[in-house]
Image (tube, helix red, strand yellow):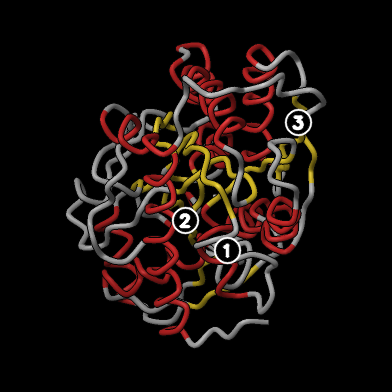
Amino acid sequence: MTDRLFVSRRTAIISGGLAAASLAAMPLTGLAQGSYPEKPITLVSPFGGAVDFLARLIVVQLNNRLNGNVIVDLKLGGSGTIGLAHVARAAPDGYTIGMGTSTALTSAPHLIKSPGYEVERSFTYLGLIQTSRQVLVVSPQLGVSTLAEFVALAKSRPGALNFGSSGIGNSIHLAAEEFNSAVGIKAVHIPFKTGPETDAAIMGGEVQYTFASVPTSLGLINGGKLRPLVVTGDSRDPSLPTVPSLKEAGSPAALPDQLFGMVGPANMSPAVLAKLGKAIQDMQADSAFQDAVRKGGGIPSQIYGDDFRKLVLADSRRWGDLIKRLGITPS
């Protein structure tokens, strides 16, 4: 899951007025909702791991609210674009929806010539389900325990340290590039195919650091395999309460949270949105669901509709600008 030197604007549980205002165009009452759903709803997950985990939490909740008619369909590949392109092409009848993530919505479209969708107009933005922080992790063998120690080491050895990510231009790579620029260090990027491969490379000494999604890195951090130095954002992450934030550590870098939301095809009907939107709102207000999100390392969110879309477009512009500055061309 996942960013240009301004303070992250998504903290803790995002809720309240934004959610109410953003659903003004998504009325939840007073519409003829018919008998939707009359057949199973497919929730497309474009990634495994933390995204698929969240999708399955969502399915349990929506099945309780939509007559047991929601299933998960994994459509992997293309940095999430294969799954989201399938959603964008689907009929806008509410029977195909998808998990929209930072990588698939904000960075991948700048890296793939024909992703199969345009973030501005191909989707109905249903809701931001959770955010998650990224965490700067290093090998315990590197011999540093704080951000200040790490930056001092990297500056004393310009170009000698390697950092890993799960692919050129993904949210982890871009976060690390922004961080390096902000704190004034030079390091070599080593791309891998997956996050676990990156983690293995840190533990094996091939690379010295990476930014990792908190939900996917908790196990290795708690097991002592990776050492966390800071989390992105203005405040500490509830899943890593002893790890300071970038702001707390005095870093000039400020990276946004990773987004994990739900989208549908463009032009979904108001009647379907009314019923589906209410089910999503009720799910996100459910304390058991919020607890499950936190246990998975996420931060529950209650942002809907156009407010979710605005966050996506802002991050897309930011990553697009950085990709151009880095000279990465679409393939």
Q: Looking at the image, do the residues carrying marks 2 and 1 touch, with CB atoms under 8 Å apart?
A: yes
- Residue 301, given in percent of the width and then of the height, sits at 41, 32
- What numbered label is drawn on residue 41? 3
Task: List the residue tagged with mark 1.
Answer: 165
Nearest the viewer among 155 and 107 is 107
Q: Is residue 310 left or right of residue 206?
A: left
Say few, some or many: other residues with alpha carbon within 10 Å of mark 2 (under 14 / 14 to 19 / 20 or more).
Answer: many
Task: List the residue tagged with mark 2.
Answer: 211
Q: Looking at the image, do the residues carrying marks 3 and 2 touch, with CB atoms under 8 Å apart?
A: no
Q: Is residue 164 above or below residue 276?
A: below
- What numbered label is drawn on residue 241? none
Q: CA distance from mark 3 to mark 2?
A: 35 Å
- Residue 295, given in percent of the width and then of the height, sits at 51, 22
Q: CA distance from mark 2 to mark 1?
A: 8 Å
Quadrant for the C terminus in the image: bottom right
Mark 3 secondary-structure assignment: strand
Q: Is residue 150 above or below residue 43?
A: below
- Please tell me whether mark 3 or mark 2 is closer to you in this view: 3
Asked which quadrant contains residue 148, the reply is: bottom left
Say few, some or many: other residues with alpha carbon within 10 Å of mark 1 (under 14 / 14 to 19 / 20 or more).
Answer: many
Amino acid type, mark 2: Phe
Amino acid type, mark 3: Ile
Mark 1 secondary-structure assignment: strand
Name the residue: 58% across, 53% down: 123
Asked which quadrant contains residue 227, the reply is: top left
Amino acid type, mark 1: Ser
Earlier in the chain: of badge 3 and badge 1, it is 3
Name the residue: 55% across, 71% down: 169
